[in-house]
Image: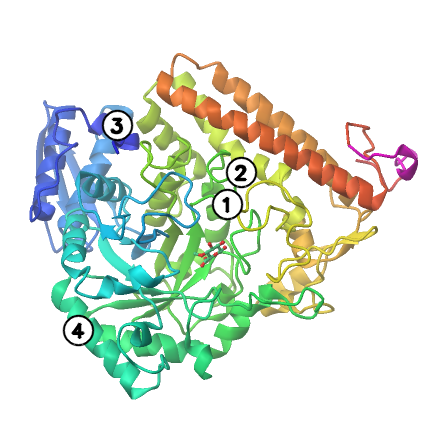
Amino acid sequence: MSYEPIWLKKATLPGKPGFSSYIPGEGIEGSIERELSVLHDLREDFVWSVMVTEALPEEGYEILVGDGKVDILGGSKAGVLYGIFDAMRQLILTDTVVPVSERPACPLRMLNHWDNADGSIERGYSGNSFFFRNRELIVDDRTLFYARLCASVGINATVINNVNVHEDATKLITDEYLPKLREMAECLASYGVKLYICINFAASMQLGGCKVSDPLDPDVIAYWEKAVAHVYEAVPMLGGFLVKADSEGRPGPHTYGRTQADGANMLARALAPYGGKLIWRCFVYNCSQDWRDTTLDRACAAYNYFHPLDGQFDDNVILQVKNGPVDFQVREPVSPLFCGMTQTNLMLEVQAAQEYTGQQKHVCFLVPMWKDVLRFHTYAYSENDRVRDIICGAHRKSENCGIAAVANTGDDENWTGSDFAAANWYGFGRLAWNPSLSAEQIAEEWAGLTFGDDKEVSAVIVKVLLASYSIYERYTVPLGIGWMCQPNNHYGPNVEGYEYDRWGTYHRASHSAIGVDRSSRGTGYAVQYTEPLAKLYDDPSTTPTELLLFFHRLPYNYLLPNGSTLIQHIYDTHFEAVDELRSLIASVVTVQGLIPEKEYTRIMERFAMQLASAKEWRDRINTYFCRISGIGDAKRRKIYAVSEEDITYPSDADPEYTS
Ligand code: GCW
């Protein structure tokens, strides 16, 4: 399948070096040469030179400019490449180069692909895998271009297979795959991207003939030592393993009464002699909950399992924590693990794949959401530390930390299905490199690189991106409640879809109130946080409005700080967001003709799907809450309440309804 150069469009002219064929063994020197010639094509009148110097941090770089001469210095060859891409970005956006001195904030800047060996992608919204086809690994020009795109935004690591490791992918660590895996690792490394793989915790049984996968069993330990030695003999540049254990049916140490630390350390010790890292996910919870049991709260699970183990993990273990305590909902509080694990290496996991945010049919630029997470004050070490400090290693002085995004790519021609979704891939890399960049700056860069330098087009694209997350949030789930989507595929509304299921994801709406009480009077989730956060979240009057229903169970006539009742807020946000979406679409129509037709058509096709789905969200949510509460919209907009006699309209005279 052919592919487009997306944000490297201007740096990839047909027949010119950027679109090069993959030549095995070419190495990072080959990439530097190729990218230098792109720079040269962009500005022939400049004299370009590159140099590696130990005076700079390993992945850092400096660009020196003087008298038509540009020197790019890197702390390593990868640093040089990052410097070249910076110069390229500057040239394309501003037609000139200014001096800069840069180093990445996060040591690990990683993508997690949920690609299966058969070529399908779990939660993939842009075609099939370009890493696997029919149980075979593919290494070709597209792999190289993927690495080029990653390097151009500073991504330095990737996991190519799904965390749910099924039978075929279990064999990635065997001779069936190792030679090709090495080729893959070399291809990626030629752009400074380190390959990682997901392993199956039960491989000792499935491949090694052991009776168990108990991490303290000597046969299991011996199996992994041998298996890892074999893998590193074939693929010495492998970064390590990522593991999903004891979660959603995946095997893990809990089966044997062992802890998550027992499981992680056993694998980490097998990897340590080779410098390998073991990334262990904290997404551990009971997915067979009885919905009748209102004392059990899934949000509490990760902290309950991992917090008591703080300090027990080996140094080459990194715990990978989803941004929120449940699962990539449109709005969740930041996971309390970032507040309470001061003796453990941590990595943040966000999801660029738009599983719950419109599945790449809806525009949803996630950088603003990620920035909220990164700047969140954890109070773990001091008053001033934020998630970004923790994942950049500021406190533990460790290189074993960073940020991972579940990737949103596939083999679609434009890589991400939706053209706008590429901004999330781009933005993730830029933010991981420098969390202080603003969402606006990232959006502007991406728009300029992707759609050219027309100011009008850029302004419209940036406006769409920056408005999109807030709009999506408002026509979908109100006030952080979550999980009102279709079960299984997670697209579109279904208010009670998860209500009586086993997944621990309930809103428990009744005729008078909605939400789960997660305060100290309820499940106690709020008090997993450090102070002053625990106190703040424990009280509805100090809980941030956008998270109100995540933490509290409240009546529909509860008054919000803006003077609106909770139910009126639901109506207002849903009506307004659909209207705003309509006007955003109209603004894109104004630049028809200034955007290439192919892209424009693709964008409009997706907007049509988004608008239809947004209306469905609005009408289902509004109708559900109108019917269940019997309270009508103070502004009398169209809601499908069936029987008018059942509805009471808040009167203007009633001070409780001053929306
Ligand atoms: O939300 C769930 C997804 C699963 C995914 C899981 C996880 C890869 O629906 O598809 O499995 O999260 O993060 O492990």
255 vs 600, nearest the viewer: 255
Above or below residue 211? Residue 304 is above
Q: CA distance from mark 4 to mark 1?
A: 41 Å
CB-based contact (under 8 Å), mark 3 and mark 1: no
Above or below residue 24? Residue 462 is above
Quadrant location, the C terminus: top right
Q: CA distance from mark 4 to mark 2?
A: 46 Å
Above or below residue 102? Residue 203 is below
The residue singled out by tag 1 in the image is 369
The residue singled out by tag 4 in the image is 229
CB-based contact (under 8 Å), mark 1 and mark 2: yes
The residue singled out by tag 3 in the image is 9
The residue singled out by tag 2 in the image is 469
Estimate the x, y position of residue 344 in percent, counting from the top left: 40, 72
> Label 3 is placed on what type of residue?
Lys
Q: Residues within 10 Å of mark 3 (few under 14, many from 20)?
A: some
640 vs 543, nearest the viewer: 640
Write down the quadrant of residue 84 in the picture: top left
Does the beta carbon at disc 4 come under 8 Å from ligand 1?
no
